[in-house]
Amino acid sequence: MDSEVKEKIIERMEERNLSIAELERRAGLSIHSVRNILKGRIKKPSAQSLQAIAEALDCSIIDLMNNSPTAIGQHSLDLERKFKKSPILECPDLMVECTSTVLKLIKKSETKVTVDEYLDIVKKVYFYSSKEEPRKLDIRFAEWLIESQLGIQKSSA
């Protein structure tokens, strides 16, 4: 994982006077998971782990990666490599849910997108969500992906 992201996690932990164990507890993660991320033993933490860490630190994943455009770019490249091969549509109901949810989130953001951007986001949300058991839409990932791909600033309302 990008060292700037690690530094942001440590910085936010220090600001909140949190130990690694307390961060793991607040994030609902297993013992040593944050420690292993920070020490580089876990090279690619899951989006769920990063989301849980961000929430425990009262921020978003984007906040943790804010000064690290290369980390965001690398994440997008990793996702794209995974999706270059077009596998069989194994979960048609999940695809329908991803399609409609992404469309609703984009409409709600009042952002204009191209057809390619929309389809790219749907595809990434579908593949990401279909990896987990049970296979269901990961709404947090969808929201995060739309915000990061389209450069939408989250309102603090």
Image (spheres, rainbow, N blue to C red):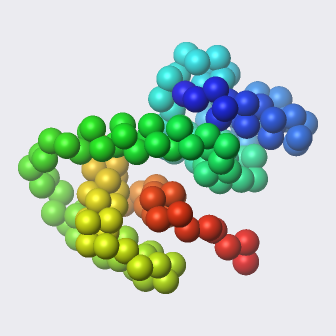
Left or right of residue 106, residue 36 in this image: right
Q: Quadrant of the N terminus?
A: top right
Q: How many marks?
A: 0
Left or right of residue 66, residue 87 in this image: left
Residue in the image at 26% along x and 72% along y = 115
In front of the other: 155 or 37: 155
In front of the other: 30 or 47: 47
Q: Position of residue 137 (x, y in %)?
A: 36, 60
In front of the other: 29 or 128: 128
Q: Position of residue 124 (x, y in %)?
A: 32, 53
Q: Position of residue 81 (x, y in %)?
A: 27, 38
Q: Position of residue 104 (x, y in %)?
A: 40, 79
Q: Determine which quarter of the picture holds residue 146.
A: bottom left
Q: Quadrant of the C terminus?
A: bottom right
Residue in the image at 63% along x and 68% along y = 154
Residue in the image at 34% along x and 48% along y = 128
Left or right of residue 143, residue 90 in this image: left
Can residue 136 be seen? no
Residue in the image at 73% along x and 37% along y = 8
Q: Is residue 2 above or below residue 54?
A: above
